[in-house]
Image (cartoon, rainbow, N blue to C red):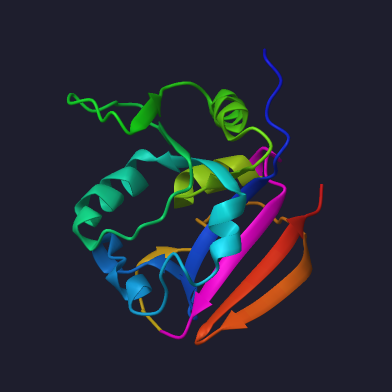
Amino acid sequence: MTDAGTGKVVVNRVMSLDGFIAGPGHTMDWVFEHMTSATFPEVMAATGAMLIGRGTYEVGKRMSDENTGYDGGAQFVLTHRPPDEPDPSVTFLTCDIEEAVATARRAAGDKNLEILGADVAAQCLQRGLVDEILVYVLPVLLGDGVRFAPPGLDRIDLEPFSNVQSGGVTMLRFHVRK
């Protein structure tokens, strides 16, 4: 296998104060009420590729009218069922999680690989593939939706190393202890 890139593998999350990364029905409109791609531009600048799951990809497609303007580099979607209609802006992967991370890290080069999507992130965390977790905590309580971590995820110890506030958004960063 070719060497992977030298950047970090970073789980990137936007989260409500009550621990949801998406609202009921996987809604994400609440995110754009509080932040834009300009809120923390250093994160986007450090990102060379993104690995997401099929569900997150579908939510993103539904939200494309929002035009968030986030450029995280090459996009990879890990899925058991690639779409019938190809998307020229995305590479669909049907391999295991370790190979998907290695492929996306190669594309990221010396920048970070950003992991989005609850299931893909949980798989990466369970297999010890994550270096860092970045969480944007937004000032909203959703009450229901997609939790930050799915039930059954084993304990993972973290080491906080940064917290920054921009308006009502707080960015927390943690190293994953290995």
Question: In front here: 50 or 175?
Answer: 50
Measured as percent of width and height from the top left, residue 133 is found at 65, 58
Q: Is residue 49 left or right of residue 177?
A: left
Residue at screen point 28% across, 70% down? 29
Residue at screen point 47% across, 46% down? 119
Q: Could you say which quadrant of the image residue 32 lies in?
A: bottom left
Could one spot residue 152 in this view of the protein?
A: no
Residue at screen point 26% across, 45% down? 58
Measured as percent of width and height from the top left, residue 170 is found at 58, 79
Q: Is residue 142 above or below residue 57?
A: below
Q: Is residue 126 above or below residue 20?
A: above
Could one spot residue 150 in this view of the protein?
A: yes
Rendered-image quadrant of the N terminus: top right
Taking the magenta stretch, the answer to whether it contains residue 128 is: yes
Residue at screen point 29% across, 51% down? 60
Q: Could you say which quadrant of the image residue 78 lies in?
A: top left
Region of the chain picked out in magenta, as a range: 126-140
Q: Is residue 48 left or right of residue 164?
A: left
Measured as percent of width and height from the top left, residue 38 is found at 47, 68
Q: Is residue 161 left or right of residue 90?
A: right
Measured as percent of width and height from the top left, residue 94 is found at 41, 22
Residue positioned most to the top: 1
Question: In front here: 3 or 109?
Answer: 109
